[in-house]
Image (tube, grey):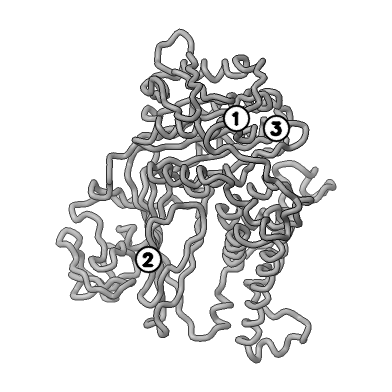
Amino acid sequence: LGHTVPVVGLGPEGIVRCRACRTYINPFVQWVDSGRRFRCNVCGQLNDVPPEYFCSLDGEGRRADAAQRPELSCGTVEYIAPAEYMVRPPMPPTYVFAIDVTHAAVACGAVAAAAAAIKASLDALPGDELTRVGLLTFDSVPHFHTLRPGMSAPQMLVVPDVDEPFVPLPDDLLVNLRDARESVDAALDTLPAAFASTTCVESCTGPVLQAAFMTMSSFGGRILLFQTTAPSVGIGKIKARDNPRAYGTDKEPPLRRPDDGFWVRYAAECSRAQISVDVWAFGGGSRPQYVDVASLAGMPSVTCGGVHYFPGFVAARDAKRLHAEVLHSLHRPTAWEAVMRVRCSRGFRTSSFHGHFTNRSTDLLSMPCCDPDKAFAVQISHEEQLVQGNVAYVQSALLYTNSAGERRIRVHTLGVPVVSELHQMFAAADGAALAALSAKLAVERCLTCTLDAVRRSTVDALAGMLREYRLASGAAARGVGGGSLAYPANLRHLPLWTMGLQRCAALRGSARDVTSDARSAALHFVTAAPTDALMRALYPDVYPVWDDPAVGPWGTPQQPPQQTPQQ
Protein backbone atom coordinates (compact mmCIF):
# COMPACT_ATOMS: atom_id res chain seq x y z
CA LEU A 1 0.00 0.00 0.00
CA GLY A 2 1.45 3.35 -1.03
CA HIS A 3 4.22 1.78 -3.10
CA THR A 4 4.53 1.53 -6.87
CA VAL A 5 4.02 -2.00 -8.15
CA PRO A 6 7.31 -3.17 -9.73
CA VAL A 7 7.07 -4.01 -13.44
CA VAL A 8 8.92 -7.07 -14.74
CA GLY A 9 10.12 -6.65 -18.29
CA LEU A 10 9.88 -9.49 -20.76
CA GLY A 11 13.27 -11.17 -21.19
CA PRO A 12 14.35 -13.88 -23.65
CA GLU A 13 13.15 -16.57 -21.23
CA GLY A 14 9.57 -15.24 -21.26
CA ILE A 15 7.44 -15.52 -18.13
CA VAL A 16 8.61 -18.36 -15.89
CA ARG A 17 5.71 -20.49 -14.58
CA CYS A 18 5.08 -23.94 -13.16
CA ARG A 19 4.37 -26.31 -16.03
CA ALA A 20 1.82 -28.28 -13.97
CA CYS A 21 -0.42 -25.72 -12.20
CA ARG A 22 0.73 -22.61 -14.13
CA THR A 23 1.62 -20.68 -10.97
CA TYR A 24 3.83 -17.68 -11.68
CA ILE A 25 7.30 -17.78 -10.21
CA ASN A 26 7.41 -16.00 -6.86
CA PRO A 27 9.59 -15.51 -3.75
CA PHE A 28 8.27 -18.70 -2.12
CA VAL A 29 9.52 -21.28 -4.65
CA GLN A 30 12.34 -23.60 -3.53
CA TRP A 31 15.52 -23.78 -5.59
CA VAL A 32 17.17 -27.18 -6.03
CA ASP A 33 19.96 -28.74 -8.08
CA SER A 34 22.19 -25.67 -7.64
CA GLY A 35 19.50 -23.39 -9.08
CA ARG A 36 18.85 -25.41 -12.24
CA ARG A 37 15.37 -26.39 -11.05
CA PHE A 38 12.72 -25.00 -8.74
CA ARG A 39 9.92 -26.63 -6.79
CA CYS A 40 6.54 -24.94 -7.16
CA ASN A 41 5.27 -23.71 -3.79
CA VAL A 42 1.64 -24.32 -4.82
CA CYS A 43 1.62 -27.84 -6.27
CA GLY A 44 5.11 -29.15 -5.44
CA GLN A 45 6.06 -29.83 -9.08
CA LEU A 46 9.78 -29.74 -10.00
CA ASN A 47 10.43 -27.43 -12.97
CA ASP A 48 13.52 -26.84 -15.08
CA VAL A 49 14.85 -23.30 -15.07
CA PRO A 50 15.26 -21.83 -18.58
CA PRO A 51 18.97 -21.38 -19.38
CA GLU A 52 18.46 -17.63 -19.83
CA TYR A 53 16.97 -17.40 -16.33
CA PHE A 54 19.63 -19.44 -14.49
CA CYS A 55 21.57 -17.95 -11.59
CA SER A 56 23.72 -19.61 -8.92
CA LEU A 57 22.61 -19.93 -5.29
CA ASP A 58 24.17 -18.50 -2.17
CA GLY A 59 24.98 -20.43 1.00
CA GLU A 60 21.35 -20.26 2.20
CA GLY A 61 19.91 -21.67 -1.02
CA ARG A 62 18.72 -18.30 -2.34
CA ARG A 63 19.45 -16.99 -5.80
CA ALA A 64 22.24 -14.48 -5.85
CA ASP A 65 20.11 -12.12 -7.99
CA ALA A 66 16.92 -12.37 -5.88
CA ALA A 67 17.15 -8.76 -4.68
CA GLN A 68 17.49 -7.51 -8.29
CA ARG A 69 14.49 -9.49 -9.56
CA PRO A 70 11.13 -8.13 -8.29
CA GLU A 71 9.33 -11.41 -9.02
CA LEU A 72 11.71 -13.19 -6.58
CA SER A 73 11.63 -10.55 -3.83
CA CYS A 74 8.15 -8.94 -3.92
CA GLY A 75 4.75 -10.44 -3.18
CA THR A 76 3.14 -8.20 -5.82
CA VAL A 77 4.56 -7.68 -9.31
CA GLU A 78 3.32 -6.81 -12.76
CA TYR A 79 4.49 -8.54 -15.93
CA ILE A 80 4.45 -7.11 -19.42
CA ALA A 81 2.46 -9.82 -21.20
CA PRO A 82 3.80 -11.35 -24.43
CA ALA A 83 1.70 -11.87 -27.54
CA GLU A 84 0.56 -15.38 -26.56
CA TYR A 85 -1.43 -13.82 -23.69
CA MET A 86 -3.61 -11.86 -26.12
CA VAL A 87 -6.74 -13.13 -27.84
CA ARG A 88 -6.75 -9.97 -29.98
CA PRO A 89 -4.68 -6.76 -30.12
CA PRO A 90 -5.40 -4.37 -27.22
CA MET A 91 -8.38 -2.16 -27.95
CA PRO A 92 -8.32 1.64 -27.39
CA PRO A 93 -10.29 3.04 -24.41
CA THR A 94 -13.83 3.64 -25.65
CA TYR A 95 -16.66 5.52 -23.94
CA VAL A 96 -20.30 5.84 -25.01
CA PHE A 97 -22.45 8.28 -23.03
CA ALA A 98 -26.22 7.66 -23.06
CA ILE A 99 -28.20 10.52 -21.49
CA ASP A 100 -31.91 10.54 -20.61
CA VAL A 101 -33.45 13.78 -21.98
CA THR A 102 -37.06 13.30 -20.89
CA HIS A 103 -39.04 16.16 -19.33
CA ALA A 104 -38.16 15.05 -15.80
CA ALA A 105 -34.43 14.95 -16.62
CA VAL A 106 -34.49 18.46 -18.10
CA ALA A 107 -36.65 19.91 -15.32
CA CYS A 108 -34.42 18.73 -12.47
CA GLY A 109 -31.24 19.84 -14.24
CA ALA A 110 -29.80 16.36 -14.74
CA VAL A 111 -29.22 16.85 -18.49
CA ALA A 112 -27.22 20.06 -18.08
CA ALA A 113 -25.31 18.70 -15.08
CA ALA A 114 -24.42 15.43 -16.84
CA ALA A 115 -23.31 17.22 -20.02
CA ALA A 116 -21.14 19.64 -18.03
CA ALA A 117 -19.56 16.84 -16.00
CA ILE A 118 -18.77 14.79 -19.12
CA LYS A 119 -17.25 17.78 -20.89
CA ALA A 120 -15.09 18.62 -17.87
CA SER A 121 -13.74 15.06 -17.82
CA LEU A 122 -12.66 14.88 -21.46
CA ASP A 123 -9.26 16.52 -21.03
CA ALA A 124 -7.96 13.79 -18.71
CA LEU A 125 -9.63 10.71 -20.16
CA PRO A 126 -7.19 7.77 -20.22
CA GLY A 127 -5.77 6.67 -23.55
CA ASP A 128 -4.42 9.97 -24.91
CA GLU A 129 -4.68 9.97 -28.71
CA LEU A 130 -6.28 6.49 -28.76
CA THR A 131 -9.45 7.41 -26.85
CA ARG A 132 -12.78 7.13 -28.66
CA VAL A 133 -16.14 8.54 -27.55
CA GLY A 134 -19.78 8.44 -28.64
CA LEU A 135 -22.92 10.28 -27.56
CA LEU A 136 -26.51 9.05 -27.46
CA THR A 137 -29.58 10.71 -25.98
CA PHE A 138 -33.06 9.29 -25.59
CA ASP A 139 -36.61 9.93 -24.52
CA SER A 140 -39.32 7.86 -26.22
CA VAL A 141 -36.90 7.26 -29.13
CA PRO A 142 -33.09 7.07 -29.44
CA HIS A 143 -31.13 10.08 -30.74
CA PHE A 144 -27.73 9.53 -32.37
CA HIS A 145 -25.29 12.46 -32.41
CA THR A 146 -22.88 12.56 -35.33
CA LEU A 147 -19.47 13.78 -34.18
CA ARG A 148 -17.47 13.67 -37.42
CA PRO A 149 -14.36 15.92 -37.25
CA GLY A 150 -14.64 19.21 -39.08
CA MET A 151 -18.44 19.49 -38.97
CA SER A 152 -19.75 23.05 -38.79
CA ALA A 153 -22.34 21.94 -36.22
CA PRO A 154 -23.24 18.60 -34.64
CA GLN A 155 -26.20 16.76 -36.10
CA MET A 156 -28.76 14.56 -34.37
CA LEU A 157 -30.31 11.54 -36.08
CA VAL A 158 -33.56 10.14 -34.69
CA VAL A 159 -34.49 6.45 -35.10
CA PRO A 160 -38.20 6.09 -34.30
CA ASP A 161 -38.25 2.26 -34.48
CA VAL A 162 -37.67 1.13 -30.89
CA ASP A 163 -38.66 -2.49 -31.59
CA GLU A 164 -35.80 -3.06 -34.03
CA PRO A 165 -33.25 -0.31 -33.40
CA PHE A 166 -30.33 0.16 -35.77
CA VAL A 167 -27.27 2.40 -35.89
CA PRO A 168 -27.19 5.01 -38.66
CA LEU A 169 -23.78 6.17 -39.88
CA PRO A 170 -21.75 4.16 -37.34
CA ASP A 171 -18.44 5.69 -38.47
CA ASP A 172 -19.65 9.16 -37.42
CA LEU A 173 -21.09 8.12 -34.05
CA LEU A 174 -17.93 6.77 -32.44
CA VAL A 175 -14.96 9.06 -33.08
CA ASN A 176 -11.40 9.66 -31.96
CA LEU A 177 -11.64 12.23 -29.16
CA ARG A 178 -8.55 14.19 -30.14
CA ASP A 179 -9.61 14.51 -33.79
CA ALA A 180 -13.25 15.38 -33.06
CA ARG A 181 -12.88 17.32 -29.81
CA GLU A 182 -14.61 20.44 -31.14
CA SER A 183 -17.59 18.42 -32.38
CA VAL A 184 -17.89 16.59 -29.06
CA ASP A 185 -17.76 19.83 -27.07
CA ALA A 186 -20.35 21.45 -29.34
CA ALA A 187 -22.73 18.50 -29.00
CA LEU A 188 -22.49 18.55 -25.20
CA ASP A 189 -22.90 22.35 -25.06
CA THR A 190 -26.10 22.26 -27.13
CA LEU A 191 -27.82 19.41 -25.26
CA PRO A 192 -29.60 21.47 -22.53
CA ALA A 193 -31.00 24.01 -25.01
CA ALA A 194 -31.93 21.37 -27.59
CA PHE A 195 -34.32 19.64 -25.19
CA ALA A 196 -35.30 22.58 -22.97
CA SER A 197 -38.90 22.60 -24.22
CA THR A 198 -39.47 18.85 -24.38
CA THR A 199 -42.69 17.44 -22.98
CA CYS A 200 -41.86 13.77 -23.52
CA VAL A 201 -42.13 11.68 -20.37
CA GLU A 202 -41.36 8.23 -21.85
CA SER A 203 -37.96 6.55 -21.73
CA CYS A 204 -36.68 3.90 -24.19
CA THR A 205 -33.66 2.77 -22.16
CA GLY A 206 -33.57 -0.79 -23.51
CA PRO A 207 -33.45 0.16 -27.23
CA VAL A 208 -30.79 2.83 -26.71
CA LEU A 209 -28.62 0.35 -24.80
CA GLN A 210 -29.01 -2.08 -27.71
CA ALA A 211 -27.87 0.66 -30.07
CA ALA A 212 -24.86 1.42 -27.88
CA PHE A 213 -23.97 -2.27 -27.88
CA MET A 214 -24.12 -2.44 -31.68
CA THR A 215 -21.87 0.61 -31.89
CA MET A 216 -19.04 -0.84 -29.78
CA SER A 217 -19.49 -4.62 -29.69
CA SER A 218 -16.45 -5.29 -31.90
CA PHE A 219 -13.95 -3.65 -29.55
CA GLY A 220 -15.58 -3.23 -26.10
CA GLY A 221 -15.36 -0.29 -23.73
CA ARG A 222 -17.62 1.49 -21.26
CA ILE A 223 -21.26 2.59 -21.49
CA LEU A 224 -22.22 5.35 -19.06
CA LEU A 225 -26.00 5.53 -18.69
CA PHE A 226 -27.54 8.66 -17.13
CA GLN A 227 -31.12 7.68 -16.25
CA THR A 228 -33.83 9.89 -14.74
CA THR A 229 -37.14 8.33 -15.82
CA ALA A 230 -37.95 4.65 -15.35
CA PRO A 231 -37.68 2.65 -18.64
CA SER A 232 -41.17 2.63 -20.12
CA VAL A 233 -40.86 2.07 -23.90
CA GLY A 234 -39.51 -0.87 -25.88
CA ILE A 235 -37.64 -3.88 -24.63
CA GLY A 236 -36.73 -3.78 -20.95
CA LYS A 237 -39.62 -1.54 -19.93
CA ILE A 238 -40.51 -1.97 -16.31
CA LYS A 239 -43.68 -1.83 -14.29
CA ALA A 240 -44.25 -0.02 -11.01
CA ARG A 241 -43.45 -2.90 -8.70
CA ASP A 242 -42.31 -1.01 -5.60
CA ASN A 243 -44.81 -2.61 -3.20
CA PRO A 244 -44.19 -1.97 0.53
CA ARG A 245 -46.74 -4.66 1.41
CA ALA A 246 -44.47 -7.32 -0.10
CA TYR A 247 -41.92 -6.94 2.68
CA GLY A 248 -41.87 -9.88 5.02
CA THR A 249 -43.39 -12.21 2.41
CA ASP A 250 -41.99 -14.44 -0.32
CA LYS A 251 -42.64 -11.56 -2.76
CA GLU A 252 -40.00 -9.38 -1.10
CA PRO A 253 -36.72 -10.82 -2.52
CA PRO A 254 -37.76 -10.41 -6.20
CA LEU A 255 -38.02 -6.65 -5.58
CA ARG A 256 -34.21 -6.62 -5.34
CA ARG A 257 -33.65 -8.52 -8.60
CA PRO A 258 -34.08 -7.33 -12.23
CA ASP A 259 -37.74 -7.28 -13.21
CA ASP A 260 -37.30 -8.19 -16.89
CA GLY A 261 -35.05 -10.89 -18.32
CA PHE A 262 -33.70 -8.37 -20.83
CA TRP A 263 -31.38 -6.84 -18.23
CA VAL A 264 -29.76 -10.17 -17.42
CA ARG A 265 -29.40 -11.18 -21.07
CA TYR A 266 -28.04 -7.79 -22.06
CA ALA A 267 -25.48 -7.86 -19.26
CA ALA A 268 -24.27 -11.30 -20.35
CA GLU A 269 -23.87 -10.09 -23.95
CA CYS A 270 -21.94 -7.02 -22.76
CA SER A 271 -19.60 -9.18 -20.69
CA ARG A 272 -18.84 -11.38 -23.69
CA ALA A 273 -18.11 -8.28 -25.80
CA GLN A 274 -15.87 -6.75 -23.06
CA ILE A 275 -18.33 -3.89 -22.43
CA SER A 276 -18.81 -2.50 -18.93
CA VAL A 277 -21.96 -0.57 -17.97
CA ASP A 278 -22.10 2.22 -15.37
CA VAL A 279 -25.47 3.55 -14.21
CA TRP A 280 -26.16 7.05 -12.90
CA ALA A 281 -29.74 6.99 -11.61
CA PHE A 282 -31.27 10.33 -10.65
CA GLY A 283 -34.93 9.87 -9.73
CA GLY A 284 -35.29 13.62 -10.27
CA GLY A 285 -37.95 15.84 -8.79
CA SER A 286 -38.88 17.32 -5.44
CA ARG A 287 -39.52 13.75 -4.26
CA PRO A 288 -37.40 10.75 -5.33
CA GLN A 289 -39.04 9.06 -8.32
CA TYR A 290 -38.90 5.29 -8.73
CA VAL A 291 -36.50 4.30 -11.54
CA ASP A 292 -36.05 0.60 -10.61
CA VAL A 293 -32.37 0.65 -9.70
CA ALA A 294 -32.66 -3.09 -9.01
CA SER A 295 -33.21 -3.74 -12.73
CA LEU A 296 -30.64 -1.20 -13.93
CA ALA A 297 -28.04 -2.55 -11.48
CA GLY A 298 -28.26 -5.97 -13.11
CA MET A 299 -25.91 -4.70 -15.84
CA PRO A 300 -23.07 -3.32 -13.65
CA SER A 301 -23.32 -6.39 -11.40
CA VAL A 302 -22.18 -8.65 -14.24
CA THR A 303 -19.90 -6.26 -16.12
CA CYS A 304 -17.98 -4.86 -13.10
CA GLY A 305 -19.54 -1.43 -13.50
CA GLY A 306 -20.81 1.05 -10.93
CA VAL A 307 -24.17 2.30 -9.65
CA HIS A 308 -24.46 5.95 -8.61
CA TYR A 309 -27.82 6.94 -7.13
CA PHE A 310 -29.03 10.52 -6.63
CA PRO A 311 -32.52 10.42 -5.03
CA GLY A 312 -34.62 13.45 -5.93
CA PHE A 313 -31.84 15.01 -8.01
CA VAL A 314 -31.76 18.81 -7.88
CA ALA A 315 -28.96 20.45 -9.86
CA ALA A 316 -28.41 23.29 -7.39
CA ARG A 317 -27.72 20.75 -4.65
CA ASP A 318 -26.36 17.66 -6.43
CA ALA A 319 -24.48 18.92 -9.50
CA LYS A 320 -21.17 19.27 -7.63
CA ARG A 321 -21.38 15.72 -6.33
CA LEU A 322 -22.26 14.43 -9.83
CA HIS A 323 -19.33 16.37 -11.30
CA ALA A 324 -16.91 14.91 -8.74
CA GLU A 325 -18.15 11.32 -9.17
CA VAL A 326 -18.08 11.45 -12.98
CA LEU A 327 -14.52 12.79 -12.97
CA HIS A 328 -13.42 10.17 -10.46
CA SER A 329 -15.07 7.36 -12.42
CA LEU A 330 -13.48 8.39 -15.72
CA HIS A 331 -10.03 9.42 -14.51
CA ARG A 332 -9.14 6.59 -12.09
CA PRO A 333 -6.79 3.82 -13.27
CA THR A 334 -8.72 1.27 -15.31
CA ALA A 335 -7.96 -2.31 -16.27
CA TRP A 336 -9.63 -3.20 -19.59
CA GLU A 337 -10.56 -6.66 -20.87
CA ALA A 338 -9.53 -8.23 -17.57
CA VAL A 339 -9.63 -11.85 -16.44
CA MET A 340 -8.52 -13.09 -13.03
CA ARG A 341 -7.60 -16.54 -11.74
CA VAL A 342 -6.89 -17.57 -8.14
CA ARG A 343 -4.66 -20.57 -7.34
CA CYS A 344 -4.01 -22.09 -3.93
CA SER A 345 -1.85 -24.81 -2.39
CA ARG A 346 -2.54 -28.51 -2.70
CA GLY A 347 -5.17 -29.52 -0.19
CA PHE A 348 -7.22 -26.34 -0.70
CA ARG A 349 -9.59 -25.13 -3.40
CA THR A 350 -11.43 -21.93 -4.22
CA SER A 351 -15.05 -22.67 -3.34
CA SER A 352 -16.78 -19.36 -4.11
CA PHE A 353 -16.21 -15.82 -5.35
CA HIS A 354 -18.13 -12.71 -4.35
CA GLY A 355 -18.24 -9.41 -6.21
CA HIS A 356 -19.24 -8.04 -9.60
CA PHE A 357 -17.92 -10.17 -12.45
CA THR A 358 -18.81 -13.01 -14.81
CA ASN A 359 -17.68 -16.44 -13.70
CA ARG A 360 -16.31 -18.17 -16.81
CA SER A 361 -15.23 -21.33 -14.96
CA THR A 362 -14.71 -22.54 -11.41
CA ASP A 363 -11.65 -20.34 -10.89
CA LEU A 364 -11.70 -17.79 -13.75
CA LEU A 365 -13.41 -14.40 -13.44
CA SER A 366 -14.11 -12.06 -16.36
CA MET A 367 -14.31 -8.28 -15.87
CA PRO A 368 -14.66 -6.00 -18.93
CA CYS A 369 -13.33 -3.14 -16.78
CA CYS A 370 -11.82 -3.12 -13.32
CA ASP A 371 -10.64 -0.26 -11.10
CA PRO A 372 -9.33 0.41 -7.56
CA ASP A 373 -12.89 0.91 -6.25
CA LYS A 374 -13.77 -2.76 -6.85
CA ALA A 375 -12.93 -5.63 -4.52
CA PHE A 376 -13.58 -9.37 -4.71
CA ALA A 377 -13.92 -11.86 -1.89
CA VAL A 378 -12.76 -15.46 -2.28
CA GLN A 379 -13.66 -18.36 0.00
CA ILE A 380 -11.13 -21.18 0.15
CA SER A 381 -12.11 -24.64 1.40
CA HIS A 382 -10.22 -27.75 2.47
CA GLU A 383 -9.97 -30.35 -0.25
CA GLU A 384 -8.06 -32.86 1.85
CA GLN A 385 -8.48 -33.72 5.51
CA LEU A 386 -4.81 -33.21 6.35
CA VAL A 387 -2.78 -30.41 4.79
CA GLN A 388 0.94 -30.97 4.32
CA GLY A 389 3.40 -28.28 5.38
CA ASN A 390 3.31 -25.31 7.72
CA VAL A 391 2.51 -22.67 5.11
CA ALA A 392 -0.26 -22.49 2.49
CA TYR A 393 -0.02 -20.23 -0.55
CA VAL A 394 -2.57 -18.23 -2.51
CA GLN A 395 -1.79 -16.54 -5.81
CA SER A 396 -4.09 -14.31 -7.85
CA ALA A 397 -3.25 -13.21 -11.39
CA LEU A 398 -5.09 -10.40 -13.19
CA LEU A 399 -4.50 -10.28 -16.95
CA TYR A 400 -5.60 -6.91 -18.34
CA THR A 401 -4.93 -4.08 -20.77
CA ASN A 402 -3.97 -0.72 -19.31
CA SER A 403 -5.17 2.58 -20.76
CA ALA A 404 -1.92 2.97 -22.72
CA GLY A 405 -2.73 -0.20 -24.68
CA GLU A 406 -0.22 -2.48 -22.92
CA ARG A 407 -1.22 -5.99 -21.91
CA ARG A 408 -0.16 -6.59 -18.29
CA ILE A 409 -0.38 -9.36 -15.68
CA ARG A 410 -0.60 -8.28 -12.05
CA VAL A 411 0.33 -11.12 -9.70
CA HIS A 412 -0.22 -11.24 -5.94
CA THR A 413 1.32 -14.11 -3.95
CA LEU A 414 0.55 -14.63 -0.27
CA GLY A 415 1.95 -17.15 2.20
CA VAL A 416 -0.37 -18.03 5.10
CA PRO A 417 0.72 -20.06 8.15
CA VAL A 418 -1.10 -23.35 8.73
CA VAL A 419 -1.89 -23.82 12.44
CA SER A 420 -3.06 -26.86 14.37
CA GLU A 421 -5.18 -25.07 17.00
CA LEU A 422 -8.39 -23.23 16.28
CA HIS A 423 -7.68 -20.40 18.70
CA GLN A 424 -4.43 -19.67 16.83
CA MET A 425 -6.41 -19.14 13.64
CA PHE A 426 -8.78 -16.75 15.44
CA ALA A 427 -5.85 -14.80 16.83
CA ALA A 428 -4.45 -14.25 13.32
CA ALA A 429 -7.76 -13.36 11.65
CA ASP A 430 -8.36 -9.96 10.02
CA GLY A 431 -11.49 -8.52 11.64
CA ALA A 432 -12.18 -5.99 8.89
CA ALA A 433 -11.84 -8.62 6.16
CA LEU A 434 -14.22 -10.92 8.06
CA ALA A 435 -16.74 -8.10 8.39
CA ALA A 436 -16.46 -7.31 4.67
CA LEU A 437 -16.98 -10.96 3.72
CA SER A 438 -19.96 -11.21 6.06
CA ALA A 439 -21.47 -8.10 4.45
CA LYS A 440 -21.04 -9.44 0.91
CA LEU A 441 -22.59 -12.78 1.88
CA ALA A 442 -25.51 -10.95 3.50
CA VAL A 443 -26.11 -8.96 0.30
CA GLU A 444 -26.21 -12.16 -1.75
CA ARG A 445 -28.78 -13.64 0.63
CA CYS A 446 -30.92 -10.50 0.20
CA LEU A 447 -31.67 -11.63 -3.35
CA THR A 448 -33.35 -14.82 -2.14
CA CYS A 449 -34.41 -14.12 1.48
CA THR A 450 -36.32 -11.48 3.39
CA LEU A 451 -34.41 -8.74 5.19
CA ASP A 452 -35.48 -10.07 8.58
CA ALA A 453 -34.02 -13.49 7.76
CA VAL A 454 -30.78 -11.94 6.49
CA ARG A 455 -30.33 -9.81 9.58
CA ARG A 456 -30.91 -12.81 11.85
CA SER A 457 -28.49 -15.00 9.92
CA THR A 458 -25.76 -12.37 10.08
CA VAL A 459 -26.03 -12.04 13.86
CA ASP A 460 -26.28 -15.81 14.26
CA ALA A 461 -23.11 -16.30 12.24
CA LEU A 462 -21.22 -13.84 14.45
CA ALA A 463 -22.55 -15.45 17.63
CA GLY A 464 -21.63 -18.92 16.37
CA MET A 465 -18.10 -17.80 15.54
CA LEU A 466 -17.55 -16.26 18.97
CA ARG A 467 -19.01 -19.36 20.60
CA GLU A 468 -16.49 -21.50 18.73
CA TYR A 469 -13.67 -19.23 19.84
CA ARG A 470 -14.76 -19.49 23.49
CA LEU A 471 -14.78 -23.28 23.26
CA ALA A 472 -11.46 -23.38 21.42
CA SER A 473 -9.75 -20.99 23.82
CA GLY A 474 -10.18 -23.34 26.77
CA ALA A 475 -8.44 -22.06 29.86
CA ALA A 476 -7.95 -18.58 28.41
CA ALA A 477 -11.71 -18.08 28.18
CA ARG A 478 -12.54 -19.54 31.57
CA GLY A 479 -11.42 -16.35 33.25
CA VAL A 480 -14.12 -14.40 31.42
CA GLY A 481 -17.47 -13.93 33.17
CA GLY A 482 -20.35 -16.09 32.04
CA GLY A 483 -22.25 -13.16 30.57
CA SER A 484 -19.28 -11.62 28.77
CA LEU A 485 -18.01 -12.08 25.26
CA ALA A 486 -14.67 -13.78 24.75
CA TYR A 487 -12.80 -12.78 21.61
CA PRO A 488 -9.22 -11.97 20.60
CA ALA A 489 -8.11 -8.34 20.45
CA ASN A 490 -7.88 -8.39 16.65
CA LEU A 491 -11.64 -9.11 16.44
CA ARG A 492 -12.72 -6.57 19.03
CA HIS A 493 -14.52 -4.40 16.47
CA LEU A 494 -16.25 -7.25 14.61
CA PRO A 495 -19.48 -7.04 16.70
CA LEU A 496 -19.53 -3.27 16.14
CA TRP A 497 -19.17 -3.63 12.37
CA THR A 498 -21.85 -6.34 12.33
CA MET A 499 -24.27 -4.04 14.12
CA GLY A 500 -23.33 -1.30 11.68
CA LEU A 501 -24.22 -3.64 8.83
CA GLN A 502 -27.66 -4.17 10.37
CA ARG A 503 -28.26 -0.43 10.30
CA CYS A 504 -26.85 0.49 6.90
CA ALA A 505 -29.22 1.26 4.02
CA ALA A 506 -28.68 -2.20 2.51
CA LEU A 507 -30.27 -4.10 5.43
CA ARG A 508 -32.00 -1.55 7.64
CA GLY A 509 -35.70 -1.66 8.41
CA SER A 510 -38.31 -2.11 5.68
CA ALA A 511 -39.89 -0.10 2.87
CA ARG A 512 -40.83 2.68 5.30
CA ASP A 513 -37.18 3.22 6.27
CA VAL A 514 -35.32 2.92 2.94
CA THR A 515 -36.74 3.21 -0.58
CA SER A 516 -36.30 0.30 -2.96
CA ASP A 517 -33.96 2.28 -5.22
CA ALA A 518 -31.77 3.49 -2.35
CA ARG A 519 -31.56 -0.05 -0.96
CA SER A 520 -30.61 -1.52 -4.34
CA ALA A 521 -27.86 1.09 -4.75
CA ALA A 522 -26.57 0.30 -1.25
CA LEU A 523 -26.59 -3.43 -1.96
CA HIS A 524 -24.52 -2.84 -5.08
CA PHE A 525 -22.02 -0.71 -3.14
CA VAL A 526 -21.56 -3.30 -0.39
CA THR A 527 -20.88 -6.06 -2.93
CA ALA A 528 -18.28 -4.02 -4.81
CA ALA A 529 -16.61 -1.96 -2.08
CA PRO A 530 -13.03 -2.57 -0.90
CA THR A 531 -12.64 -3.36 2.77
CA ASP A 532 -11.51 0.09 3.92
CA ALA A 533 -14.35 1.88 2.10
CA LEU A 534 -16.90 -0.60 3.41
CA MET A 535 -15.70 -0.22 7.00
CA ARG A 536 -16.03 3.56 6.72
CA ALA A 537 -19.60 3.09 5.54
CA LEU A 538 -20.48 0.68 8.36
CA TYR A 539 -18.78 2.82 11.04
CA PRO A 540 -18.24 6.34 9.71
CA ASP A 541 -15.58 8.73 10.95
CA VAL A 542 -16.79 10.99 13.76
CA TYR A 543 -15.83 14.68 13.84
CA PRO A 544 -16.27 17.09 16.78
CA VAL A 545 -18.67 19.94 16.04
CA TRP A 546 -17.04 22.32 18.49
CA ASP A 547 -13.88 24.37 18.19
CA ASP A 548 -10.84 22.74 19.79
CA PRO A 549 -8.04 25.17 20.69
CA ALA A 550 -5.49 22.41 20.08
CA VAL A 551 -6.48 21.76 16.44
CA GLY A 552 -8.43 24.83 15.38
CA PRO A 553 -12.01 25.22 14.12
CA TRP A 554 -13.94 22.09 13.15
CA GLY A 555 -14.89 21.27 9.58
CA THR A 556 -11.52 22.21 8.10
CA PRO A 557 -9.41 19.76 6.04
CA GLN A 558 -6.85 19.69 8.86
CA GLN A 559 -9.37 18.46 11.45
CA PRO A 560 -8.64 14.78 12.24
CA PRO A 561 -11.44 12.21 12.67
CA GLN A 562 -12.08 10.90 16.15
CA GLN A 563 -11.71 7.29 17.31
CA THR A 564 -12.23 5.31 14.12
CA PRO A 565 -11.70 1.59 14.84
CA GLN A 566 -8.52 0.30 13.23
CA GLN A 567 -7.05 -3.17 12.97
Vertically, is 269 above or below 190? below
Q: Position of residue 255 (x, y in %)?
A: 65, 51
Vertically, is 380 above or below 408? below
N-term mark: 2 or 1: 1
N-term mark: 1 or 3: 1
Vertically, is 456 above or below 88? below
Residue under numbered circle 3: 284
Q: Residue at x 43, y 49 (%)?
A: 367
Q: In the rendered image, which quarter is residue 460 located in?
A: bottom right
Give residue 343's mark.
2
Per the model, the C-alpha gap separating discs 1 and 3 is 14 Å
Q: In the rendered image, which quarter is residue 102 located in?
A: top right
Q: Residue at x 63, y 47 (%)?
A: 521
Per the model, the C-alpha gap separating discs 2 and 1 is 45 Å
Q: Nearer the viewer, residue 57 or 217?
A: 217
Give residue 203's mark.
1
Question: SS at mark 2?
Answer: strand
The quadrant in which the C terminus is found is bottom right
* Mark 2 vs mark 1: in front: 1
Question: Viewed as shown, does residue 197 lie left or right of 394?
Answer: right
| Residue 498 in view of the camera | no
Q: Type of residue at label 3? A: Gly
Q: Would you say the residues marked 3 and 2 are in contact, meaning their CB atoms lie under 8 Å apart?
A: no
At label 2, counting other C-alpha atoms closer than 10 Å, the crowd grade (few under 14, some 14-19, many 20 or more) is many
Give residue 371's mark.
none
* Mark 1 vs mark 3: in front: 1
Question: SS at mark 3?
Answer: loop
Per the model, the C-alpha gap separating discs 3 and 2 is 46 Å
Q: Residue at x 56, y 28 (%)?
A: 99
Question: SS at mark 1?
Answer: loop
